[in-house]
Image (cartoon, coloured by chain):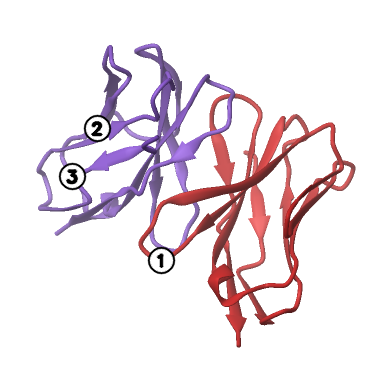
Amino acid sequence: GEDVEQSLFLSVREGDSSVINCTYTDSSSTYLYWYKQEPGAGLQLLTYIFSNMDMKQDQRLTVLLNKKDKHLSLRIADTQTGDSAIYFCAETETNDMRFGAGTRLTVKP
Amino acid sequence: DAGVTQSPTHLIKTRGQHVTLRCSPISGHKSVSWYQQVLGQGPQFIFQYYEKEERGRGNFPDRFSARQFPNYSSELNVNALLLGDSALYLCASSSGTLETQYFGPGTRLLVL
């Protein structure tokens, strides 16, 4: 089956940039997403990229897509303590989304 | 505008019981999807409904069923609960079956 993989943990200092990486196996993925989950909460959509794009920027967030290597990254500029959460990468081709296990981002003051 | 709402927020059941979880989509959205998130893992797709019809089903046993109502709200039913059904159940709505999904806060189910 198709898999989405992420590193489990990332720790950065406040004000630094964070880069969260994701790899996927389904070459027919249409959309790739980044969601944020804070403790005890649901998933908050951060951004998404269509598979025919290689970069998307939205304020502090930059998404890079390398379709050849099936690699997706999320860069958060000027990371703040409020960015501490679990970040999920997800991909979809049809009507079901496949998620990675999530990367827990810890931001130290 | 209200986002996706789910009820109840928390639920405790015992093995063998039945549970019904409810979801109201964002106004104007016609598609509802259900996901199970076990602690420490990413969400797993259970069902998608669009215009009251099932459009997709994940790898879950027949104990799991769902339906969508004319107002596009949805229910997820789980029969004969097992300890392993303990999870956060997330509902997501979208305008269409392939459109971006917006998630509700989830229902946390604990099976004892």
Colour of chain A in the rendered structure image: red
Determine the CA span between mark 3 and mark 2.
Answer: 8 Å
Label 2 neighbour load within 10 Å: few <14, some 14-19, many 20+: few
Mark number for residue B63?
A: 2
Which residue is found at the position 73% from the left and 60% from the top? A60
**Front residue of this view, candidates A107 and B32:** A107
Q: Is disc 3 in the same subunit as disc 1?
A: no
What residue does disc 3 label?
B81
For disc 1, the chain is: A
Which residue is found at the position 22% from the left and 50% from the top? B9
Determine the CA span between mark 3 and mark 1.
Answer: 25 Å
What residue does disc 1 label?
A39
- In the picture provided, is B98 more to the left or to the right than B20? right
Task: Give the amino acid type for the residue marked by disc 2 in the picture.
Answer: Arg
**Looking at the picture, how far across and down is residue B37, in whole percent?**
40, 51
**Looking at the picture, how far across and down is residue A108, in whole percent?**
60, 85
Colour of chain B in the rendered structure image: purple
The first of marks 3 and 2 along the sequence is 2
Task: Give the amino acid type for the residue marked by disc 3 in the picture.
Answer: Leu
Which residue is found at the position 73% from the left and 55% from the top? A59
- In the picture provided, is A75 more to the left or to the right than B18? right
Task: Give the amino acid type for the residue marked by disc 1 in the picture.
Answer: Pro
Determine whether A10 is above or below B104 in the image.
below
